[in-house]
Amino acid sequence: MSLALFDLARDLNKVNAEYEVVVGDWNVKNPGDRASKGADGRRNTAMVQRFAVQRGLIEPLKPILGGGEVEPVTYVSGERRTWIDYYLVSKKLEDRGLIRAAAVLADPINESDHKPVMLGIDADTALGRSKLWDDIKQAQEENDKSNRNAKFKAVQLGKVDRVKGYQEAVVKKWPKEGLLSSRITEYCNMVNEMGSRVWEDKAVEEDVVAQGDQLMAEALGAMLAGQEEVYKKLPVVGRRGAGGQRKHQSSPAYVKLARR
């Protein structure tokens, strides 16, 4: 749980949005719910509580219900009835009156054993007060200018030769001198052992984030290099030297090259 929350916090920091809305099947009781009976449950709920406090997040449904002893139920298993599916949202959304509704649907959908949770937000007002649309537009423009997506599509799970070529390329590009795999394992163990202490000290959090970013950069570099290798071997459509594009299909020329 601590590692998952740490990864989530890092991703949210990268977005740097004015408002944050997080939802999911937490498999952990809501921090505002009655305490779990087991020690593990209480510890994990405490981690979610600290995460929420650190980021200024609240659970929006309980205040709408008026507090008290009434607890929503989102998961039923035999006699067990729990509230483990919920939203955590920026308190500023509530303070500015931007939360319109929150609820738990009466019945599950899509054959799930969880009941859906719903949240209504005045999105027009919320988005108008943030830089979110500018960020989305900039990201789309950068994506349009880059051919990284085309290279990523070159590795298709349904094409065994391409997957094999990608795996071999990543192994060749994977940093060996730094023992990256061992460092990643040690890093994960460290974060799990630290638990919520990661967020209690700003200097510690920044150091842990920096270590994680460095490991991610090294791993991502190897994976992108592997994609590049597969992409280079795709057959080119059009006249060579005239801006021909690489075609993402198993043409006879590609199959022959890949098998050789």
Image: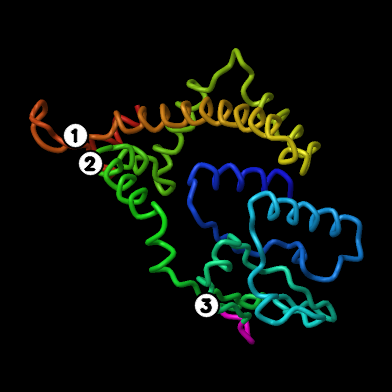
- On residue 100, which mark appears? 3
Q: Residues within 10 Å of mark 3 (few under 14, many from 20)?
A: few
Secondary structure of the residue carrying tag 3 is strand
Secondary structure of the residue carrying tag 2 is loop
Secondary structure of the residue carrying tag 1 is strand
Highlighted magenta segment, given as a residue range: 105-109
Dot 3 amino acid type? Arg
**Rendered image quadrant of residue 86:** bottom right
Does 178 sit above or below residue 96? above
Residue position for label 2: 247
Residue position for label 1: 236
**Rendered image quadrant of residue 108:** bottom right
195 to the left or right of 129 = right
**Where is residue 186 shown, x and y percent of the image?**
73, 28
| Marked residue nearer the N-terminal end (1 or 2) | 1
**Of the residues tagged 2 and 3, which is closer to the observer?**
3
Residue beneath the point at 31% across and 33% down: 231
Residue beneath the point at 15% across and 38% down: 237
Find out whether the residues at labels 1 and 2 contact each other: C-beta distance under 8 Å.
yes
Residue beneath the point at 86% across and 58% down: 42
Residue beneath the point at 22% across and 37% down: 246
**Where is residue 140 shown, x and y percent of the image?**
30, 48
Q: Examine the residues drawn in magenta and state their main secondary structure.
A: loop
**Rendered image quadrant of residue 176:** top right
Q: Residues within 10 Å of mark 1 (few under 14, many from 20)?
A: some
